[in-house]
Amino acid sequence: MVLSTSGILAEEMVVSSRGELMEACARARPGSTIAIAPGKYAGGVHLPSIKGTSTAPVTIMGQRAEDRPVFEGGRFGWHLSECEHVVIKQLKIRGASGNGINIDDGGTRESPAHHITLEDLDVLEIGPKGNRDGIKLSGLDDFVVRNCRVAGWGGSAIDMVGCHRGVVEQCQFEGREGFSQANALQMKGGSSDLLVRQNVFRDVGQRSINIGGSTGRDYFRPPEVDYEATRIEVAGNQFFGSVAPLAWATAVGGQVHHNTIIRPEKWVLRILQENGVERFLPSQGGRFEHNVVVCDGRVLVPVNIGEGTAPETFAFANNFWLMNGGRPPRLPSTEIDGEHAVYDAEMDLEAVLAEQAKRGRGASAYRRQDFVFRCDFESPSWFREWGLTEARDLVDAVSADNERQFEPLSGKALRIKVRRGGHYGASLEFAFRKRTGAEPEEIHFRYYLRLANDWKPERGGKLPGVAGTYGRAGWGGRPVDGTDGWSARGLFRGLKDGRTPIGYYCYHADMKGKYGSEWQWEEENRGLLENNRWYCIEQFAKMNTPGKNDGVLRGWVDGQLAFERTDVRMRDVEDLKIKTVWLNVYYGGSWTAAEDYHLYIDEVVIARDYIGPR
């Protein structure tokens, strides 16, 4: 073993035997890099309790990417247990009789493994039969699987049980003769907040992606949820073959968009209830949008519906269906803006896909953005996406409201009511630490807003925005001092010439008096909103350097900059960050609404980069 020290904590170790690898991993400290020399090594590598940090992960990698080390055979290839902040890359694992790579929490559900990155790995010929997975993830949070290749397996190429806040991207999944290959990706056992993007699936068996599944009670993380999977996004992927490229199985919500599906064997997607325990909700609320589907004569029924599900709650929009027959596909709910054409085996398929990409459909039209959260209120259980168990009073998702001249943006929108004599309309929060594991320093937040025909405020109030109140200060007449909290909610004022002025209502360290500062969006009058019209509202907040006046707030209306301030002092201490996006609608101060007022919100997106209109 060759050891070179590049810092007090960080070590760089080159190993050339299995024993040296195990010794180096036992010695690893935050910042350590362990480089494995080319060659063949025995499988069965067990690595417990390797712990890096967010700024200094432990990296275990092949020494040379062009000649990566090969780990062959064994009951398992690699097993990491109770590890944190670890990067594994540039390895080949082949021929394990059990799982190729197994990462778990050691059975301690209250303390998951977390921040693991698997990158540029080859996982080959695992199993070959039964529940033997290429990559098995159990009780893992905040992870990335990127640019990996999995070819030939028994159960799942990647099986996720009780996993949260993960990304699987730019991977290749290939079925092989002689391997049972139940599915390529499976997300179950209470899994949530997972993104599957820009992968390729080729002949991967029964199901390419299984959103949900059937998990024993003892394996759920968290233990008492009423779904197998929720808040799953599948985008920008290419599917070739498989019996059914997609399945929802005892799953709540989930969005499948901008994918290309080529010649599935029997169905395009399935809606199933595979876990029959009473506590579970029926599969519901999935969305299938902006996809291109190419089916030959083998697909007679594109959507397979199982008993005990809620297929009518699934939404279909703007898909292109190339089917064997002149009729549009039979779907469980009416599709919005869908198109279909007749499949011909002699047609120029590449030209068809290119034309659909121009129309914003299929994998080639996917515009990659680092979305943190999306909600369009189409699911009947939309409130679960905001961490609630039931809808609150004064808010409901509607697709029609003729009394108030409502016209939908797309499907349903959230209708919010402020009662006569009242203040409250809505108070929903996306809590970053709970949902993503960390609080950001900057964030973009976009939503669509429509003021109803009865929206006639005489005085002002609050609209959605961002905040870091921490339950201490920054709202409700609780002034801040730079150490205890801050907020930058939206603002509305009383009608001005029939239009509603909007802006920021900000509690900041330089505020004067008891209440926050009011900063109207005045650039070219873009912050003056009419009733009965949809507006795209986007906000950007960037925390200041503690103690300095360099925090940033920006606002856009319909993609046009309406406000900018670059001298805001939200904090004087490092631990104040962006705690929540606060979907708040409140009438007043001390005054109350003179009549019932309504507004509508739709297409909420939180992202790390500028979002813009849809």
Image (cartoon, helix red, strand yellow):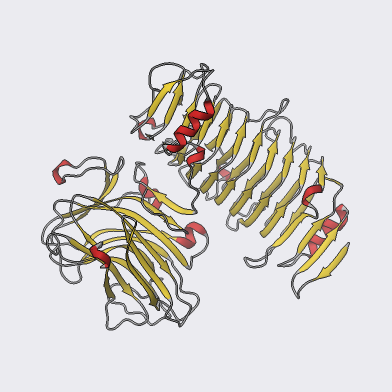
Tell me the quarter of the picture where residue 463 sits. bottom left
Point out residue 222 in the picture as x, y percentages from the top left corner: 52, 50
Q: Image height check: is 569 above or below 393?
A: below
Point out residue 451 in the picture as x, y percentages from the top left corner: 21, 53
Direction from residue 13 to residue 566 in the image, left or right: left
In the image shown, does 88 or 530 lie closer to the viewer? 530
Q: Image height check: is 468 above or below 164?
A: below
Tell me the quarter of the picture where residue 474 sits. bottom left
Q: Image height check: is 460 above or below 229?
A: below
Point out residue 536 in the picture as x, y percentages from the top left corner: 31, 54
Which image quadrant: the N terminus?
bottom right
The answer to whether residue 276 shows anywhere in this view is no
Residue pictured at 55% horizontal, 41% vertical: 188
Direction from residue 51 to residue 392 in the image, left or right: left
Point out residue 257 in the picture as x, y percentages from the top left corner: 46, 39
The answer to whether residue 153 shows anywhere in this view is yes
Residue pictured at 43% horizontal, 66% vertical: 579
Q: Image height check: is 365 above or below 328?
A: below
Residue pictured at 71% horizontal, 29% vertical: 129
